[in-house]
Amino acid sequence: MRKRITLKLNDETRSLYVEPNDILLDVLRDALGVKSPKIGCERGDCGACTVLLDGKTVRTCLILAIEADGHEITTLEGLTQSGLTPVQQSLLKHNSFQCGYCAPGMVLSATELLGKNPSPNTEEVKEAISGNLCRCTGYQPVIDAIVAVGKKAGRRA
Amino acid sequence: MNQLKFVGQSPERIDGLEKITGAATYVDDIDFGARLLHAEIVETPYAHALIKSIDTSAAEKVPGVVRVVTGKDFPYRFGLYMQDRFSFPTDRVRFVGEQVAAVIARDAKTAKRAAKLVKVVYEELEPVLDLTKALRDDAVLVHPDLGNYTRCPWFFPRAGTNIAHWRKTRKGDIEKGFAEADVILEDTYTVPRYAHCAIEPHVVVGLYDLSGRLTLWSASQSPYTQRHVLAQALAPLGLSHQNIRVVTPYVGGGFGGKAGVSMEIIGAALAIMVKGHPVKVRWSRAQEFYNTYQRQGVIARIKLGAKKDGTLTAIEHTLHWDAGGYVEYGANVVNAVGLSATGPYRIPNVKIDSVCVYTNLPPGGPYRGFGYSEFHFGLESHMTRMAHKLGMDPVEFRKKNAIREGDTLAYGAKMNPSGLLESIDRVAAEIGWGKKEVSKNPNKVIGKGFACYWKAPAMPPNAASCAFIKFNEDASLNITISGMEIGQGLLTVMAQIAAEILTVPVEKIRVELPDTDRNPYEWQTVGSHVTWGCGNAVKAAALDVRAKMFEVVERAHGLSRDTLYLENERVKSRERADFELPLRDFVINGIQMKRGNFLGGPILGSGMFMPEFTSALSDPETSQGGHPNVHYTVGAAAVTLEIDKKTGKARVLKAVLAVDAGKAINPRLVKSQIVGGVVQGLATVLYEDIRYDLKGKLVNANFTDYKIPTSMDVPEEIVPIIVEVPQPDGPFGARGTAEHTMIPAAAMVANAVEDALGRRIKTMPLTAEKIALELQGVSYEDVKGSTMGLCFAGHPDAYKFHTKAAAKK
């Protein structure tokens, strides 16, 4: 029994039919062509599939597509539409990623944090990205880059 | 050499923007359209069983199912160094989770549903889940046909046993060496299996098109090796290299797990069965754990002799590896260790036996460190214990015995230039060696641990690297290589090497990801050899390009090529100071002459590197006579550990690691290898704890129960130190550093735990649970439950290293 859902994806209204048991991650990637949320574990452990749902990070592998009906979703594609955000710029400058597979989820977790707390300290950053697994970097360059954005924001304030 | 402008700098990664914007494409991100089919694997629940029958009829009737494939359709064997692995086994399964059939359907859900309808009847066999039993004379055999397998000439399997390979290294006179020793220390260490845990699971899309060409889009470190292994396996179907193409877009982490061929053979097999349709095989996280490669478990006995003054006289190092059901790649890990298990020390008398044992656990294979992390745990624990036994400082003891350039290695070749002593000194200074630290919290104690390490790339002697360079009209350039960007920063480093020769800035250089139809040959991106090998190829290609430019300028302007040089993207002349020709003026269009014609044309270059001095041929009884390793990278590391006496939880206050990079082409990238590698190494000793039940089933094949570090687990401080003693045959003196950074982690932690608590733990991992038990005076080995981390559930100290079967030829 397919069901019609309507959601706002990266500022664009999209309507489509989904199966009730389709998970949001598969619908985003396969039906809507948004590839930045990655498949890593399919059980909410790794955070590679993170997107913002109404501004809050969610694991799209743990959400049914029908649950996103009427909601607003932002992925890395949407975030980057008008150029790099300060946290992306900082991550780039810090060479924060290696293989890059965790990067989309990590950027969105950092974006959520900085939205709530523009000048986070190291512990707050660690906590905010603790649901995003990375096997390459040892996290340090990611943490440093996010803290640096906060410091810059702090100076401006 | 002139002042270097690009080499030794740390520009931003040239793949950084793609990765930060989500533009970077990984295999699973490629769209294949409406004809794409999906596969689901039917797996065996038994560690060891005969396949009596497979009934696919019910699955075939499900609407949407296109084809069900079994070993009857596709019985081919494959393997990198020994062809012992099956695309689909025909008669026997050898580990829990092995593929016995695949259902191909229009969509993934249908494939999944139908796979449950495939009925397989097995006859259960006794699984080989104990190394002691595996090596018995009357052992159940995992591979009764072992004697018939095609293999590389430096593997020595023993037909009629479970021994897939046995590397023996003998130097000096071992009896005499121990007779000369004043102190002898002998003990057993165990290291369980580990999983790579790249965040991107393995995925492959195969297309056998209607013209009969097979293309694989593969998440791989080894496009050319995949093509070659597939060409060998698929030869019975009339396929050869020219009919096979492997394309590797960005890969989401490898760590050795995506080297060689593992599940990709299934992608190839299924594609051939559904000609004209692309078919996708994507591993689940659980399959990622049990059906690719795992780091092999090992139980090792070390006997070490030293004189009173600390001089080492002899080492006997015996390693029995739990290599799993297939060892086509893993046996080479065993081989590498068999050559190098002395560690970076001068030891005149050496006896190493590194034995690769088939068991009924998942296939063993390459993992960052390639066996060296495993043997360093025991060896570097033992070195600290020996120093204590001699009443010496562990750092001084290591310095006294540290290997030096020109020393004779265990297999007879000479040691390359080495910054080991400098590494030891700088690490000792940075960690404050000898200064006891006391925790402010009375419930916590602090200890320090030290370890040295070395590692050589393990490669066949003809492992080659190549590069093509082409210019564009704006004098930007594209480099094509088949070295793989697996996160280490290869693309950036290759751009820096070309930039240095050609004076074209790094941001004007693109380095293209591999496609075996277009990019030139590279053996594999493993062994931390590509900065060195592929870097040499890129340097040669850049020199070729430069020579071609100078040749055209000489012909067009009458300036001797010997006087020409490059500066800021211009050709200049030492004999005519006013001459300068921007590259963009001629690298595509040539140089216009007075009568209107043009000389030259598009500038193209190529470069190749193969280490012609190596050889894997040697005496099988001693390993003397060959030159199996190109060179070793050495270093040292230390840790300050704070341990909670109540919970056993260890917190890393500071970790320091020095690596002799020869020349750091990009120091920031070397430092990121150190930070990432140290954390991965610490994870293997502090957190990751693989468990099999006693029937061989992996019970924690997920990130909830197999704990890799999160951002909350990183050390308080990691200090990376780069030492630069140049490698004479490396590009600008460089050698590899990436794997090495996790090798000393486990031993330095075990040494720090002993320093803090006075208790020596000889079995990895050193989890909080194990440390807490030790604090209560209980040995974990005495109370561990009915699970195991490698093919040996008993107490390590009771393990017997000598068996009849093992002694027999």
Image (cartoon, coloured by chain):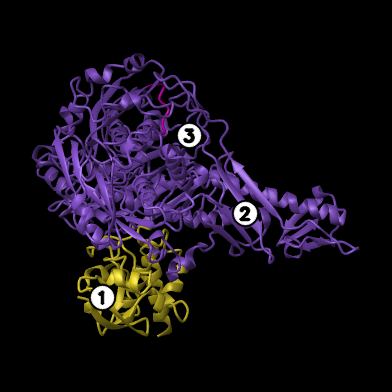
From mark 2 to mark 3, how far is it between C-alphas? 27 Å
Tell me where residue B58 appears, x and y as whole percent: 18, 53
The amino acid marked with disc number 2 is Ala
The hue of chain A in the figure is yellow
Q: Is residue B478 left or right of residue B676?
A: right
Q: The magenta stretch spans which residues?
A: B343-350
Disc 2 is attached to a residue of which chain?
B
Quarter of the rendering containing residue B511: bottom right
Q: Secondary structure at mark 3?
A: loop
Residue B689 seen in this snapshot: no
| Number of marks in the rendered image | 3
Chain holding disc 3:
B
B508 left or right, relative to B273? right
Determine which residue is flagged by label 3.
B460
The question of residue B349 being in magenta is answered with yes
Does A145 appear in magenta?
A: no
The residue indicated by pointer 2 is B498
* Marker disc for residue A18: 1
Q: Amino acid at mark 1?
A: Val
